Amino acid sequence: MARNPLLTLGAGVGVEIRGNDLEVALVKSRWKGVAVDGKTTLRDFRRRPAAEWGAEYQSFLRSRGFRDLPVTLLLPRQEVIVRLLSLPAPTRAELRSAVRFQIDTLHPYGEENVYYSFAPLGRRSPNGSAEAGSAAAPALVDVAVVIAERSLIEGYADLFAEAGVKLRAMTVGAAAYWGAVRFLNTRRQEPFLLVDQQGAAFELYGESPARPFFSASFDSAAMPLERAVAAAAAELRLPEGEAVPLLVCGERSIPSPLAPEQVLGSPLQAPAEFDLGRDAAVFATALSAACPLWGWRMNLLPLARRSASSRWPIAATATAAASVGAVALLLFLRGPIQDRRYEQALEREIRRLETVEREVRALEQQAQRARAQRAELESFRRRPEADLALITEISRRLPKTAWINGIEMNDDSVQLTGQADAAAPLLGLLDSSGVLTGASFTSSITRADNREQFRIRAARRSGPPRPEAAAPPPAGPPAPGHSPAPAAHSGI
């Protein structure tokens, strides 16, 4: 059941008959959620003069800023009859006739001595699933029926009229709980069983996929709470062997596995004297009073005795609010319209700049390609100079006893083939040349004609050649009879 915010705005007072006391709660439903505006208890209302506790209620109402707010009265579960019917009725008129036809079989009172109300809960197929039936097996409608003795309803209506408290509706816990669990909880409702303890008596209400709702009241002297919970779980067809999803409210003599917020939701704010677990019933009743078009919309109070809050005192406020709302709407729309126009202008400017950006990127790519080509051409231009400098340095470094038969050069390595009296020292000479590094023999040294033939491979250095070591100081003039030694030379 989707929540319509237009139908769930308002304020309402719920009054729960709890033994000899009246529990009163004032709830406001707004766009953002529900707030509990006040909570009080009218003690011993059955024995006190009605005007006395009626004056206490009016004082409570005025302290919260209200003057005329009819209440929704929650009847004790043991004083009403709640039944669940499944009827094949496609229209509401036929449904009303079907309920009227069966009403006499649902209560022990006389034919004209009851008030009743009903609410369709939804259609389901005959096999129990929540879907339409086939042509051979038409869909069934689950209907909640509430019955109360006429004298009971008239008695409470007269008592509240004597107290000066206007009544809007009379309802039951099952109707209040059914609406409350769907009001604040937007997620899909899980199966649960609620126990509301009132001294020795307690009320059970539960829901499950197999049963739209279950409602019953027990006395602990006749049936212990544990047995009643087990019987209710069986009626709801909850899985056996698993813990019952139980919510304990009211006086709570046993622990509650579920928190009340898990089932009923959490109000935005509440006074210190309000406890959702203890006051769950009156909270759900006040919520149904604030939003009478939500939930079962069930009312046992005769139409002639129903009161509604007067709208005339708030007519001026409503007119002013409408005017303010219109101005606020115009101011609200002005911003989005301006934002939309500004957004469109930004989009046009973004598209223009995107075109400029693409052109700039294309020019950058062309410039990068040109720089790469220039660098490549510069490398080709300098390659002969680098190769010539390498050959010159190798020729200068090798001793005169070494001869080079061939040189193979590429960008990063050099391979030398030749012969020498001793090939092993050549590796160190090449590594220290400044232009080569990592010199090594690529094949075994062979000896022929008293000379060693070699094949050396070395990597080229990227930097300039290492500076030559400082030459020794010139020797003095040669001694008489000595001639200078010939300079070393290598042949290539």
Image (tube, rainbow, N blue to C red):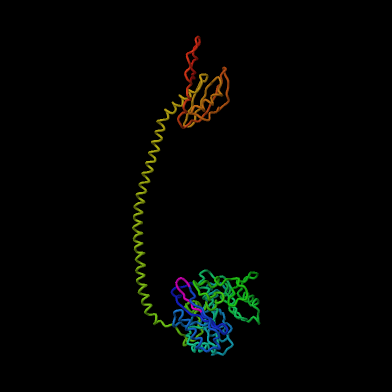
Q: Quadrant of residue 376?
A: top left
Q: Residue at left 50%, top 70%?
A: 186
Can residue 306 be seen?
Answer: yes
Instruction: Count how many numbered circles sit on residues in the image.
Output: 0
Residue 149: x and y in percent read 55, 88
Q: Quadrant of residue 260?
A: bottom right
Q: Is 221 placed above or below 409 here? A: below
Can residue 119 be seen?
Answer: no
Residue 350: x and y in percent read 36, 54
The residues colored magenta run: 25-33
Front-most of residues 386 and 96: 386
Q: Residue at left 35%, top 57%?
A: 346
In the rendered image, the residue lying farthest to the front is 476
Q: Is residue 379 magenta?
A: no
Front-most of residues 362 and 488: 488
Residue 386: x and y in percent read 43, 28
Q: Residue at left 43%, top 74%?
A: 6
Residue 214: x and y in percent read 58, 77
